[in-house]
Image: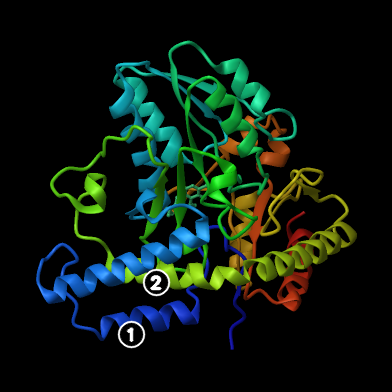
Amino acid sequence: MEKRIYLDYAATTPLAEEVNRAVYAFGQKDTGNPSSPHRFGQQAKILLEEARDIIAAGLNCKPGEIIFTSGGTESNNAAITGTLNAVDSIGKHIILSALEHPSVLETAAYLERIGFEISLIQPDANGLITPVQVGKSIRPDTVLASIMYVNNETGIVHDSAGIAEICHKNNIIVHCDAVQAFGKIPLDTAKLNADLLSVSAHKVYGPKGIGALIIKKGTPFSGIHFGGGQEANRRPGTENLAGVIGFAEAVKLLEQSKKDMAYAGNLQRLFESAIKQEIPSAVIIGEQMKRTSFISAIAFPGIHNENMLLNLDLAGIAVSVGSACSSGSIKQSHVLKAMALPDEIINSTIRFSYGRYTKPKELDETVNTIKQIIKRLA
Ligand SMILES: Cc1ncc(COP(=O)(O)O)c(C=O)c1O
């Protein structure tokens, strides 16, 4: 059989078998629209709220603080625009980091076009945004800061609780994109203390196209969609109930996430030490930093990452480079650029990401294949 090794868990995780079964079982039921007053609708409403309770327990927030969205992108869009819709009379200045996902950066670019002002914080040499940097960017008219928890390209973890603390001292609303943190590092939304927090199901073995935005009680928010009272008037439209049920099942499985984290930690150690031993010229991005165990961003100086990705793909191994556009073409990573890394590193960095179903021998095979590709291309 053709070799297939999937090392792109940060792009999306495989669907857990248990999730697949839960969604299928739901599909066998005759449920109505959760907003309908009849029995069919009310049955659907019960399933929706049961799922919300499970997800709230997994995140340590209140069920009423969760709105279901179509994923991390919509959660990020809604968090920023929805908050600013509600507070734009107070101030028009927003703080972001240059490391954010495009769903944050491009929302901000739109807001800039309609009159908001953005301060874009550049990371320090270690690829980190610190609470001190955020503090220095605060102005009297700052209303919102949006800084991600775990970076999706490097796996570097931010001090999100520290960032929330400095913002709250200055009466600033905080949004945290926790899409790459949920299930990957211990995440307790109560401790983190962000006012808004984005998560996505397909990064935690759930279905694609479903996510959540946690809006802490009392946070000003005026939704960005119109035409229905669902999700307590914060996100109109009939809920994606099959997706929500799959999401809840995935969150139930995350109870084993401590086991997942330990497992990924072993994989990361194994993989990175083999790379260092076999390919001494390789550079592990953020090696000394606090990182999630699920991502290894590694540069192979002298080999363009596009070339490496295509050669690995030909060998049946799926990896990614910093930024894949929707067209599938590759552009330079804005994250590695913001870290002020040399072009030689930026252009040769590959993101390997793994998880629950990755086998150590797949990583050994990957190291061997990379060695062969380097020999061929160098
Ligand atoms: C940090 C981060 N934020 C947001 C998103 C977008 O999430 P989704 O694919 O669910 O729209 C991603 C997806 O890669 C991500 O890594």
Q: Position of residue 146 (x, y in %)?
A: 49, 33
Tell me which amino acid carries mark 2: Gly
- Disc 1 on helix, strand or loop? helix
Is residue 308 among what the camera can see?
A: no
Q: Residues within 10 Å of mark 1 (few under 14, many from 20)?
A: few
For the N terminus, the image quarter is bottom right
- Image vertical order of residue 162 relative to residue 254, above or below: above
Tell me which amino acid carries mark 1: Ala
State the colouring used for the structure image.
Answer: rainbow
> How many numbered callouts?
2
Residue 314 placement, left or right of 268: left
Residue drawn at x 47%, y 81% as measured from the top left: 18
Give the numbered dot on residue 243.
none
The quarter holding residue 338 reads top right
- Image vertical order of residue 314 relative to residue 374, above or below: below
Give the numbered dot on residue 246.
2
Mark 2 or 1, nearer chain start:
1
Asked whether the residues under the numbered discs 2 and 1 touch, taking CB atoms below 8 Å apart as contact, a structural biologist would say no
> To which residue does mark 1 refer?
25
